[in-house]
Image: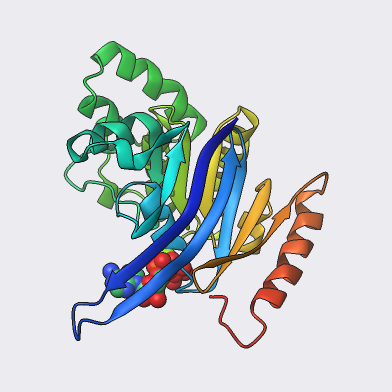
Amino acid sequence: MELLQVKNLKKVYNTRLGGQQFTALKSVSFEISKGEFVAIMGASGSGKTTLLNIIASLDKATGGDIILEGKSLKEIKDRELSAFRRKNLGFVFQDFNLLDTFSVKDNILLPLVLSGENIDTMENKLKPLALRLGLEHLLHKFPYEVSGGEKQRTAMARAVITEPKLILADEPTGALDSKASAKVLSLFEELHQNGQTIMMVTHSSMAASHASRVLFIKDGELFSQLYRGKDTNREFFDKIVSNLSVLSEGGVDIG
Ligand SMILES: Nc1ncnc2c1ncn2[C@@H]1O[C@H](COP(=O)(O)OP(=O)(O)OP(=O)(O)O)[C@@H](O)[C@H]1O
Ligand SMILES: [Mg+2]
């Protein structure tokens, strides 16, 4: 069954000055099955974050529909949206979005606190996750006391602790060096092997080569897609790189 259906999605921004309009998404349609790990690539400004934010219900579409497990996001009332997001979605933002006055532990537990979990359940979920992500010795530190890679792993832990149906990540390795990136990607691979559905925006062909499918976006439209099939990461990487050169023909910057 399709976990996510994106149907003729359109987004027009009204710019503040001059009352001009900008069409960031023209008519984007695709589906993601349960358990897929999908990477989204495209030049800077092509509409990737716009797409992710609308799927995350952080922003509203101008037209079209998003359907998660058969339910249209349009049917969800505004006052139910944050509970819906907490229950179904996990986010990893490029700038981590951690709360500075909360410890690493409290940041990770935040979505569970908001949904009213009891302390024992929270501790039981936290322990194995912190171990797996190498955060167990950092739980009482604050975000400004840990490294960029550790902040990113904290953000990952916060995104997955609720066992969301869909994980949405916007350039999760964008701010990291290659070693920290590799840790983040191996966690995604492991989650994917355990059946987790993941959507990850990335500029990095290396990061995308871990996915099972790559969607390429150009000027607010779906341009093409690549399936991994039986390719190794290396073989898939080579295909992604040559697809990007086709995508960028005409001098578009790939970022
Ligand atoms: N609030 C806004 N008002 C007007 N235009 C916007 C707004 N947000 C984004 N845009 C425009 O919409 C287009 C798509 O933006 P988006 O952030 O989705 O791009 P992106 O593919 O994520 O780029 P990047 O790789 O640089 O993050 C850009 O041209 C951007 O300038
Ligand atoms: Mg973006």
From this view, report whether residue 208 is shown above or below residue 37. Answer: below
Colouring scheme, one of rainbow, by chain, secondary structure, one colour: rainbow
Position of residue 131 in the picture relative to residue 93 (left or right)? right
Position of residue 59 in the picture relative to residue 125 (left or right)? left
Residue 186 visible, this orientation: no
Quarter of the rendered structure image containing ligand 1: bottom left
Q: Residue at x 34, y 29 (%)?
A: 87
Between 245 and 65, the one lying in front of the other is 65
Position of residue 72 in the picture relative to residue 59 (left or right)? right
Give residue 49's position: percent from left, percent from top.
41, 61
Q: Residue at x 37, y 48 (%)?
A: 151
Q: Residue at x 45, y 74 (%)?
A: 45
Residue 11 visible, this orientation: yes
Give residue 53's position: percent from left, percent from top.
37, 54
From this view, report whether residue 122 is shown above or below residue 130. Answer: above
Count of numbered circles in the view: 0
In the picture as drawn, the residue positioned furthest to the top comes out as 120
Give residue 231's position: percent from left, percent from top.
82, 49
From this view, report whether residue 84 is shown above or below residue 116. Answer: below
Image quarter where the N terminus lies is: top right
Give residue 14's position: percent from left, percent from top.
25, 73
Q: Quadrant of residue 224?
A: bottom right
